[in-house]
Image (tube, coloured by chain):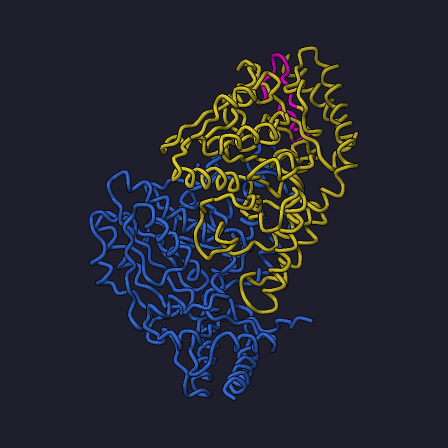
Chain colours: A yellow, B blue
Amino acid sequence: MQPRTTIYLDYAATSPLWPEARAAMAPYLDDRFANASSVYAAAREARKAVEEAREIVAAAVGARPDEVVFTSGGTEADNIALQGVAVRARNEGRDGIVVSAIEHHAVLDTARWLGKNGFRVTEVPVDTGGVLDVDALAGAVDRKTAVVSVMYANNEVGTIQPVGRCAEIARAAGARFHTDAVQALPWLALDSADADLIALAAHKVGGPKGVGALVVRRGVGVEPLVHGGGQERGLRSGTYNVAGIVGFGAAVQSTIAAREQLVPRVRALRDRLQDALLRRFPGVTVNGARAERLPNNVNVCIAGIESEPLLLLLDAAGIAASSGSACQSGAAEASHVLTAMGVPKERALGALRLTLGRDTTEADVETAVDEIAAGVKRLRR
Amino acid sequence: MQPRTTIYLDYAATSPLWPEARAAMAPYLDDRFANASSVYAAAREARKAVEEAREIVAAAVGARPDEVVFTSGGTEADNIALQGVAVRARNEGRDGIVVSAIEHHAVLDTARWLGKNGFRVTEVPVDTGGVLDVDALAGAVDRKTAVVSVMYANNEVGTIQPVGRCAEIARAAGARFHTDAVQALPWLALDSADADLIALAAHKVGGPKGVGALVVRRGVGVEPLVHGGGQERGLRSGTYNVAGIVGFGAAVQSTIAAREQLVPRVRALRDRLQDALLRRFPGVTVNGARAERLPNNVNVCIAGIESEPLLLLLDAAGIAASSGSACQSGAAEASHVLTAMGVPKERALGALRLTLGRDTTEADVETAVDEIAAGVKRLRR
């Protein structure tokens, strides 16, 4: 029999679907099934629901509804942003792509793929605190740069990046600025004025998997990645995922409404967790500790401990945690984020990421600390 | 107040979500929310559910599970097939793309986009019955053809295409053969041996919107469109839409199990509908009537009647129907499919597509015929 997950500390990998999002989706998984591009009453109702969700998502980042392009998730949004801008910019003689070294693979691998296809790619370093080196970015951006992509907050260590300054640097050179705000949306107030393009994902914010959005500032030219029926003003063809989009809207609405109260509560729990880890294990370091971080993230390395066996022990105790990005789990490589922060490989292979969320309780945190302590004790034996 | 849709005759646009698919999805929209790429118990359970759905989808087309790549829908699957094969083939000096003139826009517009980006695109004509001219295809394919794409069955007129012969022609020239089987899957037994790549969509077969698959025969090289976490063996990155994929699998399973009994029942209802239309309106022509067609499709032109006002009257009577592809609704252009079949523009602008499905009843058909008669009478006045 498989162990049951009873304490979920992996909100950065995915969030539970909020009951209010599930409730909002339900009619569209039931009798409101019409294709939102059709012409009859049921279809117009479905389309109206899509447009209401669009208004919510737009408002959450201070954008206009017609600046929101629904996608199948954050990864697709990042790909449209980078590829779509790069392809257009090449026609204007711009072939440079500048990204931070700690981007999610959706950005990093897309940039590297473009690098194999005629673009110059620069990966800008971060400091040991996990924050982008803005001077290095300024040095990497030139009049031939097509797009600069720096995430709003990092998915592994939670460090918040200086996107406002990055945007200024990009714009001064006539380049577009994209930010992956997938991890930031649940916790931070975003302002679309800070970027030309913003990638969002529903399932990190209490919405369903398989939906996301790319916010594209009016006037920013983007070549579509997926061609077809012409949905989303031709920027992203494909039958509307009505239930998914409605769930995304409801989750965003609920998140924005709860954020002010939720952030201090989650931050206090996170600090309690972090303090307990620091207190109980002398060999613990908190990655990104010096930087401003998302309130729900703690990423630690425990001296002499490897992630994999510790995660297995935690799993057996019903605790869901991670060593870093879910997308890269299973890989025996050190995290590219920690490596960029100068964490030595042997320490990086011991990273433990605990990310909290709306349903995390004090008891969860205390049990987790006890189980981590038990696991570490066992592994050190 | 908006009219209510009570009789749904637009299954080609989208299907209701089968209750069994909705039931299968429910746990993954509830407590089984884990990211299927994570390492703990709940994540492994989610991944297992994804792999079970993959086995079902693979079996439905006679493919191996590792040949199924889950996507966000049929449109994305078509785009990966065409772009992904074309980009790879260009490295081998192949720059030709050959498609039928009646492809869905997901194929046609992707081909045309590639045509603007250095590829030679040939659109092969169909006969007046809506069936591909195989000789013309043979003449269009050469040793520099990268990919041939011919849909399994047309979405507007339901005509079944000679994909086996198309595949032979493509393969004899060393080109890849792709087929968009989105409309065929609910009704026809598909054999993956007939194609190198097959596009499928969940929501046409009783599954949820926002999910589909591309079946890629082993050994067929495809460049990914979306880069990132490396899911789907690197062919389609992005967090698994677990609930969607599970719903897709359940819908396919249910459809395959019911198909043998459903096809004759739906065909009889369709024939009844078609006969009634032919009997009651002397000026009716059935588009694609001479060809082998999907059992649920009837597409007619009624002399002197335009689609739009008729659809409005039907809508007011609670009947959901269409003039053609949902993706193109609202466009005041004649259907490219009917145009390719030689239907004059003024007749093509009067097309009425009625597509039946699992829940269609005899009473639905009779009411629809009466309402169409009433609408035509009113419009002719």
Indicate the position of residue B31 as horizontal and vertical percent values.
67, 43
Indicate the position of residue B381 as horizontal and vertical percent values.
52, 89
Residue B349, quarter of the rendered image: bottom left
Indicate the position of residue A236 as horizontal and vertical percent values.
49, 50
Indicate the position of residue A50 as horizontal and vertical percent values.
61, 55
In magenta, the rendered stretch is A299-320
Q: Residue at x 53, y 30 (%)?
A: A172
Q: Is residue A214 visible?
A: no
In this view, A31 is above or below B144: below
Q: Residue at x 74, y 38 (%)?
A: A259
Residue B63 belongs to the span the image colors magenta = no
Task: Say which quadrant the N terminus of chain B sits in.
Answer: bottom right
In this view, A11 is above or below B351: above
Q: Residue at x 28, y 61 (%)?
A: B124
Depth check: B103 or B38 in front? B103
Q: Residue at x 61, y 61 (%)?
A: A46
Depth check: B255 or A40 in front? A40
Judged left or right of residue B118, residue B323 is right
Residue A301 belongs to the span the image colors magenta = yes
Depth check: B208 or B23 in front? B208
Residue A153, quarter of the rendered image: top right
